[in-house]
Amino acid sequence: MGEAIVSDLLTELLIPVAAVIGIAFALIQWVLVSKVKLTPGAVPLSNKNGYEELLEEEGVSEDDVVFKCAEIQSAISEGATSFLFTEYQYVGIFMVAFAILIFLFLGSVEGFSTKEQTCTYSKDTCKPALFNAIFSTVAFLLGAVTSLVSGFLGMKIATFANARTTLEARKGVGKAFITAFRSGAVMGFLLAANGLLVLYIAINLFKLYYGQDWEGLFESITGYGLGGSSMALFGRVGGGIYTKAADVGADLVGKVERNIPEDDPRNPAVIADNVGDNVGDIAGMGSDLFGSYAESSCAALVVASISSFGVNHNFTGMCYPLLISSIGIIVCLLTTLFATDFFEIKAVKEIEPALKRQLIISTVLMTIGIALVSWLALPPSFTIFSFGEQKEVKNWELFFCVAIGLWAGLVIGFVTEYFTSNAYSPVQDVADSCRTGAATNVIFWACFGL
C-alpha cells in the first residue's frame, strides 16, 4: 500500500512545534493589545472628529472617559471572575463524581480484570480493562481541566480588551477593529494550541504504558473529548442562564420602569448583564469550542487506530487529525495578519467585507494545507474499518472528505449571514414589516421562518 513521505520522527516534532507557535502568537497578540493603556493621557487622539468638542459640551473631560472605562472593566472582570470561581467549585464536584463513575463503569466491563485481553478489531493483545478504566478517567480529567482553562482565559482576555477597544475607537474604527480582532485571536489560538498540545502530551504519556496497543490507547484517550464537552455544558448553560436573567432584569428595571437606555451605565444591572455576556457567551463558548475540537479529534483518532494505520503501527497516519489541526494553526496565523497588518479598516461598512475575506482566505489556504498533509502524511492507499471489514481507501479520497467539510462550513456561514445580517433583504424586509405594527411583523416573521 506504500509508505507516507513524512517520517514518524518528523510528525512527533511538527505537532508540538505548531502548538507552541500558536501559543507564542497568542501571547504576542496579548502584548499588542496591552499596549493600549487604561491611564489618562496614555492614548493621544490622532483624529478628533469633534470628539473633544462633544466632551466639552457635556462637561466631561477625556481623563474622565479613561477613568470610567477602567472602572467598568475592573467591575466586569471582578464580577466575571467571581462567577466563574463559584461555578467551577460546583463543576469540580461534578467532575470528581463523574470521573469515579467512568472508572467504575469501564472497569466493571471485565470485572476490573488485570489480565490482558484480545483486541476487538485486530488479533493483537490489548491491555487489561482495569488500566483502560484508569487511563480513560485520567483523560477525562485532563479534558475537563483544559476546557475550564480555555473558558477562563477567554473571559480574561475579553474583559481585558473591552475597555481598550473602546478607547482605541477614539482614533477611528480601524484601530478599534484591530484591537478587538487581536483579542479574539488570543482566545482562538490559546484554545486550539493548548488543546492540541495537551492531547499530544497525553498520547505520548499513555504510550509509555500501552506501547503498540493503539486500539486501547486511543480508546482511553476518548475521555479527553468527553471531559471537554461535559465542562462546556456547564459553561454554556450556567453562563447562559445568568446572562439572560441579568439582561431581562436590566431591561425591565432600566428601560421599562425608569426609561433608561439599554446598556446605560446609570443602570446597575448593566454590569451584571455584561458579566453574564462574558461568562456565558465567551467563557462558555470557549469551553464549548474546545469540547467540539477535542471530541472530533478523539473520534478521528479512534477511527485511525482500528484502520491499517493501527494494525501496521503507522504513527504518522494515525496522527493525521492532529496534523490537520497543526496546519490549521499555521494557516490561521497567516490569515490573522491579513486582518491586522496587510489591510486597513477605515469605515464601519468595511468590517463585514473584511471578515468575509478572512473566511475565504483561510478556507483557500486550509484547502492547500489539507492537500499537502494528505499527500505527505498518508500512504497512497490504506484501509479503514467499515461495517466489520477493512475497506481500501485512497489518500485523495480522504482529502476530498475533509475539504468538502471545510467548504461546506464556508457555505453555511455565508448563507447564515445572508439571512441574519441587516445588509441583506431578508432582515430588511422583517424590519419594514414593523412599520405597520406588531401583528404584521409576527405574521411576516412566522412566514419567513417557515
Image: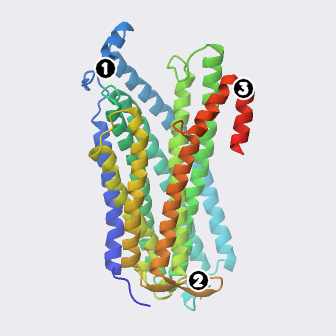
Q: Quadrant of the C terminus?
A: top right
Q: Which residue shows up at 55% across the image and 45% down it?
A: 418
What separation in Å lies between label 2 and label 1 (alpha carbons)?
A: 65 Å
Q: Position of residue 187 (x, y in %)?
A: 42, 48
- The amino acid on which the numbered mark 1 sits, given as a three-letter code, is Asn
Q: Name the residue carrying label 3.
A: 438
Q: Is residue 190 visible?
A: no
Q: Is residue 448 visible?
A: yes
Q: Are marks 2 and 1 in contact (CB under 8 Å)?
A: no
Q: Which residue shows up at 55% across the image and 89% down it?
A: 125
Q: Secondary structure at mark 2?
A: strand
Q: Secondary structure at mark 1?
A: loop
- The amino acid on which the numbered mark 2 sits, given as a three-letter code, is Phe
Q: Name the residue carrying label 1.
A: 49
Q: Name the residue carrying label 2.
A: 385
Q: How is the image coloured?
A: rainbow
What separation in Å lies between label 3 and label 1 (alpha carbons)?
A: 38 Å
Residue situated in front as seen by the camera: 147 or 300: 300
Using the image, determine if residue 6 lies above or below residue 344. Answer: below
- The amino acid on which the numbered mark 3 sits, given as a three-letter code, is Ala
Residue situated in front as seen by the camera: 255 or 136: 255
What separation in Å lies between label 2 and label 3 (alpha carbons)?
A: 56 Å
How many other residues sit within 10 Å of disc 2, few (<14), some (14-19) or many (≥20)? some
Q: Which is closer to the viewer, label 2 or label 3?
A: 3
Using the image, determine if residue 239 lies above or below residue 52. Answer: below
Q: Position of residue 62 (x, y in %)?
A: 31, 17
Q: Position of residue 14 (x, y in %)?
A: 33, 70
**Where on the picture, by quarter, is residue 421?**
top right
